Image (cartoon, grey):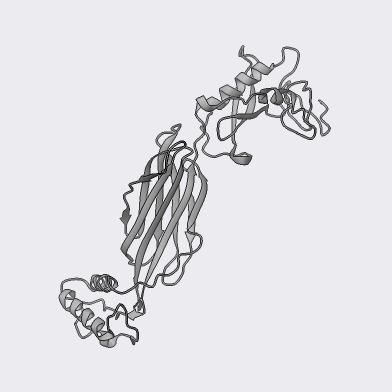
Amino acid sequence: MLLANVYVPRVPSWTPQLDTVSMDNSRHIDTVYAGETVEQLRRTLRMLLREQAFALPAQEVLTAVTQQIISYIPLQYVDAPTDTSVNGDIYPDIQVNKTMPRKGPMQPGNFIVLFKPDSERSQTGVVSVTLNQGIDNGTDISTQVWAKVKSEGRDVEDRDVELHNEKNAYWFEILNVKSGDDVQFFLRVNFVDVDGWNTGTANRWVQGNVTPRQYPPPEKIGFQPGNLEMIWDGDPRPGKTHGGHGPNPKYPKPNKDLFPGDPDGWTQADVAAAARAIATNPRPYPKYPKGNEGNWLVDGYSGRIDGSRGINITVIVAPGGDIVTAYPWPGQPDCGRTDGNGRVI
């Protein structure tokens, strides 16, 4: 078993005899580490085996010996794969799951990053990070973990995190994180592979710079000045295709679905009230943006302010809560449409 170019003998499945598991039946050692001679390493191994061989199962003997030796032999780490980081927005209950391929003595592993809100509509929650490493009978030697959180209008805050592990799974949680916070984390776990003839030291590391995102709260949802008018009449600027969903838009756009017209048609105020009602109480509650630029698409049913002439409507909400646009589903009674040239049909 190879440990930083030091070969440790294979331990039989039965309770070992000292001469059976001595360095004499290992492979050749030709390197000196940390000022220790090869003979000193041999003597250390024999001493450790003499102290522990008859008190522990063979596999535990080897693990204990390896941990003792590694404490003063510089580790030869296997470089972690390049795909060990995650960056960008993360969303409620949507796992970011990345595979770390086999490399050197390490078997494939993976890591998972997840944002878990405190409740379905909560703007605060937990960011959890899990590292799963598939080293057979692996044992961790040392670990490093830290986390930092930057909230809007506040300085960077170091967070205390507690690392947990079960077998070869390691995880921690960053508590009380708000939607929109910048969250940085780092986790490194050093492993010893104990399988067959070759023992190797290796590390896995994971780092991230993520922003948890929750659907905006009701108090953040509304219209930017002038945007409701463009949703109704269309963007007056040449070449712009935004809006134009009123029954008779002043600046018609091609291939647009239109709110019901006369008689007793919808008004601009009806559209504003319906869009707010749908966007502030989405059902089901959205987990992930489906539009461009991180926008949320919310479908709902609403009528006019007086409750009449209800229709299905899609509302697009920006990450900060601005209502980008609202339009009726195609093909509904009394809902018109423009053709490819912008003419109402």
| Residue 144 location, quadrant | bottom left
| Residue 60 location, quadrant | bottom left
Query: Where does the C terminus fall, quadrant-wise?
Result: top right
Q: Give whichever of 73, 91 is nearer the camera.
A: 73
| Up-down relation of residue 221 to residue 144 (above or below) | above
Q: Is residue 21 visible?
A: no
- Kindly identify the residue that appears in the image at 15 percent across and 75 percent down: 51
- Kindly identify the residue that appears in the image at 50 percent across and 42 percent down: 91
Q: Is residue 112 visible?
A: yes
| Residue 15 location, quadrant | bottom left
Q: Is residue 280 left or right of residue 173?
A: right
Count of numbered circles on the image: 0
- Kindly identify the residue that appears in the image at 41 percent across and 38 percent down: 125
Q: Give whichever of 288, 11 is nearer the camera.
A: 288
* Residue 135 position in % (x across, y down): 38, 66
* Residue 98 position in % (x across, y down): 49, 56
Q: Is residue 314 left or right of residue 25?
A: right
| Up-down relation of residue 213 to residue 202 (above or below) | above
* Residue 87 position in % (x across, y down): 51, 50
* Residue 308 position in % (x across, y down): 64, 14
Q: Is residue 306 left or right of residue 237?
A: left
- Kindly identify the residue that appears in the image at 65 percent across and 17 percent down: 270
